[in-house]
Each structure stands twice: as structure tokens, then as C-alpha cells.
Image (cartoon, helix red, strand yellow):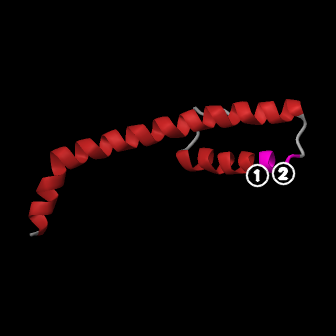
Amino acid sequence: MKTKDLTFEAAFARLEEIADLLENGEADLERTMALFEEASRLTTFCSEKLDAAEKKLQILIRDDGFKLMDEEN
């Protein structure tokens, strides 16, 4: 699965599918290794997406967060 046009939600769903496939223990060694490699790539992708979202939230809170809170009062 290519990550170029992949969303976080789709990647996470695929990780859940892979976990189920690996947990059932029916895949042969070659298939297990391929699934593990795919899961590794997807985990990196999701981690990078979460890091980017966290940084963006920190910037928004720093720059606009207090203004928004003050406007509500």
C-alpha cells in the first residue's frame, strides 16, 4: 500500500487488519514478513501524521488559543 494518497484513518484501519491477520497465525513466513514490513511503514506514516498534527495544534494554541478563550469570556 502506497502512503502518498493515504489518510491517517485508512492507514490505521489497515494496521488493524494486519494485526488481525498476524494474530490468527495462519499466514506462512513469507506472508507474515510482508505484513510486518507493511505494518512498519504504516506505523511510521501514522506517527509522522500525529506528530505533524500535534505541532500544528501547539502553534494554533500558542498563536490563537488564548484569544479564542478570552473572546468566550
Q: Residue at x 90, y 46 (%)?
A: 26
Name the side, left or right, on which 58 lies relative to 7: left
Task: Determine the CA span between mark 1 and mark 2.
Answer: 6 Å
Q: Which residue is mark 1?
A: 20
Q: Position of residue 13 (x, y in %)?
A: 64, 51
Contact? badges 1 and 2 (CB < 8 Å): yes
Q: Horizontal placement of 53 versus 59: left or right? A: right
Within-10-Å neighbours for mark 1: few <14, some 14–19, many 20+: few
Q: Position of residue 8 (x, y in %)?
A: 54, 45
**How many numbered circles are shown?**
2
Going 44% across and 42% down the picture, which residue do you hit? 50
Q: Is residue 52 above or below residue 25?
A: above
Residue 59 lies, in percent from the top left, at: 24, 41
Magenta span? 21-25
Q: Residue at x 41, y 38 (%)?
A: 51
Secondary structure under tag 1 reads: helix
Q: Is residue 14 visible?
A: yes
How packed mark 2 is, by other alpha carbons closer than 10 Å (few <14, some 14-19, many 20 or more), is few
| Residue holding disc 2 | 24
Q: Residue at x 73, y 34 (%)?
A: 36
Which quadrant would the N terminus be assigned to in this image? top right
